[in-house]
Amino acid sequence: MHRRRLSRLATRVLRRLLALTVIVALAAGLSSEIGLGLVARAIGAASGERVQIKGLSGALPFALRVEELRLADADGPWLRIERAVLELAPRALLDATLAVHSLSAGAVDLLRLPPAGGGEGGAWPLALQLDRLDIEQLRLTALGPGLPVLSMRGGAALSRMGQLELELAFGTHDGSGPRLAGTLHYASGQTLSSGELRLDSELALDDLGASGLQARLRLHAQGPIERLRLDTDGSVRLPQRAEDSELRLVAAGDLAPFDRRLQLHGLSLDLTHQGLAHGLRQRGTALVALDAGLAIEDLRLGLLAPTPAGPLGPSGELRLSGRLTPAFALDANVSELPVPVLLRWLPVPAHALDGLIGLELRLQGTPKAPLGTLDLQALGLRPTEGVARGLPAGDLRLALRIGEQATAVDARASAGAGSQLDLSGRIGGSPFTGLGPLAVRARGQVDLGLLTPLLAAGGRQLDGQLGLDLGIGGRLHAPRLDGVARLSQAAWRDRRLGLALTDIDGAIRLAGDHLEIERLSARADPGTLTLSGRLGWRAPDWPVDLRLSASDASPIELDWLRLRGDADLRLQGALARQAELGGALRFSRVDLRIPERLPVTVATLEVQEIGERRQPRRAARRAIWSSGADGPAALRLDLAISAPGSVTLRGRGIDAELGGEVRVGGDLGRPAIAGGFGLLRGDYTLAGQRLRFTRGRIGFDGASALDPTLDLEARVSTAGATAILAVQGTARAPSILLSAEPEMPQDEVLARLLFGQSLSRLSALQLTRLGLAAGAFAGIGGQGPGLLERVRAGLGLARFDIDSDARRPDDVALEGGRYLNERVYLGGRQGARTGEAQGVLRMEVSPQLRLETDVGASGARAGAAFELEY
């Protein structure tokens, strides 16, 4: 019995050794070039040429190399593998497992999808364990043209019951695109399309380029391959100057990859910008077809925006339906979209507007040559911030008909009751290129009073009607304007400049780069102004030839300045290089009034500037102009200004007439002024005493041509000394200076100016008047006139004063009177003690000789005074 058992065991061992010897010998034989060729042909024959192997090499059964492997069916090859390397672990065969350490391929091309068909189920002869799969180039030609070349890494396991599990990671071959990773479950008896797939992928992009863009994308897919459940969540963060902006996308749907259809039912888009949230929410279910391009069926998106209460609320709806690629057949509709919501979605800041937008779009053709219609209406457009919020609401309607050769345009804009602009015509070629020729006409009326809210803050006002009849030619990127703009019954007022023009009428004709002012006239009561000429508003260097004429015009009326006269001015040359302003101005009346309520001495405030200065100082501006840098520096001047005896200067006790001629040359930055307006006559009333100016001049070399400089002087010589009162500064801010020859105290100068005698000889009443006058010079006692001054003005007298009687120093006299002309004074005097009334007559024969006579009940008195300065 024991020997029998040993014999059977020895026989079994010998058989296995013999089998192993045969296998080793067979493997050695098959590893030869001839043997490998036999194996390749045997596999092809056994599979009915559905497995085709070329270039089989390596050592069986441990390592094999294949130059090309093709899988085919009755319709031909559907998978091609190139440069494949297979490394096996034969020992695992003892456990009925085909263990593959590594399977790599240089290129795998899925030429088309494999044939559908189920298996019979049941057990597989061997289990499969693939540790490492490495495909350098994976081409999915079967899924569609233009797909990127991928790379694939992973592993696989196949049980003997036919359960297949794949764990794969995909990326683009050049490494530039995202990477995907997931698992595929494939049960025995299933077709490829019914395999269970679970896919998770996450893409992260940080600091993309110089913009600091950060992006995140997560994709989850699960379910049978023939109907995958997709969930996507992505966000994009773009750092801004003040606050980050974030865009987040969430989408869900069911994907049928073999039918190339996506049922979308969970799309949402949220934008957070400057602390405000906006969003899009899908309403209902939409179908996206990918079988022949891209088509969308019934995609409805509700727009969400912040409500006054805070949370997001509905703000319009967007509908899309139709095909996008390869050719358009698309219908889009936007309804009740608030303008503020649209402006917040724009990538650039825009002015705050209110209103509602509706849009209907129908597109056909191709992206390079689109055809279709666009109808847009924006109703109730109104600015909501700044001074522009006072503008009336406006409406805009636009219709585009995009054809193969041209696009027809029809638009209308209206605002208020009297403003409407119609635009119609054609744009040649595609309107999206900007290269097509324009043939558009614009006609309408604009009520210029609509601009009042914009101008009122600057003290300006514009009224009237502007009629437009313009042709727009050229091309979109370089339009050309031809036509006429007509002003009628217009008026322009500028309170700061005192400019008042009414009955403005005229026409401006545009002809490409030039505009011609046919005749633009305005009324400046009681006369008129007329402007005509040409301006190259879009031509190089801005050529100009304008002529301004005035006839008895009074365009400027300020509280302190009024002008009236004639003018003939001409501006010609090139504004961008060198132009000349020449001509003549003849003033029949120039009234300068010094403000009564401004103190004689104005305190100087020390101002400290904080931050960057927005406007250059006047000296800096003059330097810029004189250097010729982008300003009117090259504007040469050749002006003759005359005002013969027609310049009057009044206010704060000054009453003077001046006249003369001024010649202005040089340029605007550095004018050369010759001549001036000299004193013809004038006096200064100080505390009721009239002082005659002995010399005077008005200059225009100050900070402003409308605020001339003053240089007037009055002298009183008594008792071997001369008291001098000088008026200097500007017309709007004069200053009064007291001096004497020889020098003496200010109160002594004031006494000689007021009373013609030394301070030591004044009476008590005169000292009181001297103190009041000194207080007025110092700005004490209020800015308005005193009691006597108000009485004098009310009675219409040139003088009304209380003084000591010259013949009786202890008696107080009240005197009042008027100047019959420049040299004759007639008045009356009443003494307080004697009660005697006297008539007073004074005549100035010459600046050195004066005559005076008094006539009263007690008699008459006459005298003469001669004055000589040396």
Image (cartoon, rainbow, N blue to C red):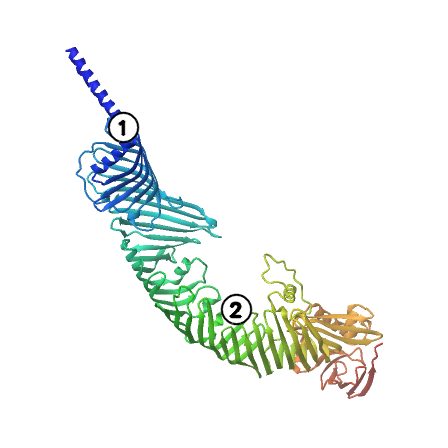
Q: What element does badge 1 sit on? A: helix
Q: What is the CA distance from the residue labelled 1 to the residue labelled 2?
A: 104 Å
Query: Which residue is rendered at x = 83% and y = 70% of the image?
Result: 742
* Res 383 visible: yes
**Dot 2 amino acid type:** Ala
**Dot 1 amino acid type:** Gly
Residue 258 in percent (x, y) is at 25, 49
Query: Which residue is rendered at x = 55% and y = 80% of the image?
Result: 532
Q: Nearer the viewer, residue 499 or 376?
A: 376
Q: Nearer the viewer, residue 478 or 866?
A: 478
Q: Name the residue at the top extreme.
A: 2
Number of residues whose C-alpha sits closer than 10 Å to that of mark 1, classed few (under 14), some (14–19) or many (20 or more):
some
Q: Which mark is residue 29?
A: 1
Disc with the residue nearer the chain's start (1 vs 2): 1
Q: Quadrant of residue 653?
A: bottom right
Residue 502 in percent (x, y) is at 53, 80
Location of the N terminus by quadrant is top left
Q: Nearer the viewer, residue 677 or 850?
A: 677
Residue 320 in percent (x, y) is at 31, 59
Number of residues whose C-alpha sits closer than 10 Å to that of mark 2, classed few (under 14), some (14–19) or many (20 or more):
few
Q: Is residue 272 left or right of residue 615?
A: left
* Res 179 visible: no
Q: Quadrant of residue 136?
A: top left
Residue 397 in percent (x, y) is at 37, 69
The mark total stands at: 2
Q: Which residue is mark 2?
A: 457
Q: Which mark is residue 461?
A: none
Whether label 1 touches label 2, CB < 8 Å: no
Of tags 1 and 2, the one toward the viewer is 1
